[in-house]
Image: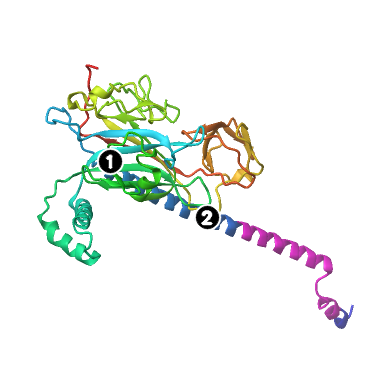
Amino acid sequence: MNQATHLCRSQRGFTLLELVVVMGILSGFLMMLVQLVDSGLRLFQEGEVGQQLADRTAHAQRIVTEELRQLRGSATGRDRESVDDRLVVQRLPIGLPERPEPDATRVQVLRAAIHLPEERERPLLEAVLATRIAVENPNMTPAAVDLEVQKRSPLEPLRGIGQMLLLPWRQENADEAFLELRAGWFLPGQEIAAGENRIVDPFTVVVPGGPELPGIAVFNNTIPILRDLLHVEFAFWSQRTVSWGNDAAPTAGGEGAPERIWDSARGGWLIDAYSGGEWSLDRGPNSLGDPLDDIQPHAILVRIVVAQPGDLAPEGLLAAEITSSDTSLRLVDGERFPGERDGGWIKVRGEWLHYDEREGDTLIGLRRGQRSTKALGHAAGSRVHVGRSVEFVVPVAHAKDDWNG
């Protein structure tokens, strides 16, 4: 073989088979690289979402703890001539409609006497003064009213006491699962507009949401202090409570269970479902004005579920429609669903469900209409929420028992 022939063969390049093999190897490496980058991005995003949820649950715990620590009451009742430090908690239809639908979802509506810090009492006092001045002088301009308020306000003493209204409300959102926690603060005896030419003290009304105190009046006199929630729940340790129990505990107290409703005056308000629940510790109307038989909880358990931000990809999606009685549901890509494989809580629109386990894409053993929500039908494509739960206990310094009745 001469030198020219050898040089020609050495310069002829790769064969087609060799190119295909090389391209296959390169494609494999590229696929592995894409998968590694995708996994890294997904883990980073999950970490970011997890940190956001952790921050928001910590924020929710701080806000609610601060509000509940302001509750006011007497540990004996002997230093009170009247019941002016009342705590009332009722389970009422969400949104406080005047004519709720059958089996409507219910939330806890809390009304309580509280300590008012100066920065919160002063604006309330100025608002009351402005109303009073406007009534006394109907022809005064708003600017003149404001000027008169500034003159009178420093002369008005601060008492440091007030009242609070606290309740969950459906958040304005395309997804009915989202809730906000609304709060309103009032001076003792302060009246609010409850209709045309009608005012009322919201703490003397037996059942908020009726004609006496419409839901719209409650909404207009409260503001959201927390948003993007899935659930808010309170439980109260009474003189007969032995354990906090769990989510399946009775909704209105039971043998050794915490109470879900409360009336510290035991004054005959909590007598049936319409009034917010039937409370076995109630003593009837004769107890309303007697502070000696009042009772206050020892502690309050708070359970909050914070939603994943709505602008992120959903935690889960329904792959097929379900009715209000179905006991299983199918998810789109169940392997990426963040819920526990061996059972847990989910929320679809306004309904809480509990499932026993996940098999592939299917959640089985559904218990419907949990956490006082209404069982509903849900269309394919509906979001399936899990959220992040936080549970904490706020001690009550003025706890009071009554072992004589």
Seen as rendered, the residue at the extreme left is 155
- Residue 181 to residue 399: above or below: below
Residue that appears at 65% across and 44% down: 319
Residue that appears at 47% across and 47% down: 178
Residue closer to the observer: 150 or 76: 150
- The CA span between labels 1 and 2 is 32 Å
Disc 1 residue type (three-letter): Leu
Asked whether residue 392 appears in the rendered view, the answer is no
Image quadrant in which the N terminus is located: bottom right
Asked whether residue 198 appears in the rendered view, the answer is yes
Residue that appears at 64% across and 40% down: 361
- Residue 234 to residue 199: above or below: above
Disc 2 residue type (three-letter): Leu
Q: Residues within 10 Å of mark 1 (few under 14, many from 20)?
A: some
Q: Earlier in the sequence, mark 1 or mark 2?
A: 1
Tell me the SS state at disc 2.
loop
- Residue with the mark numbered 2: 312
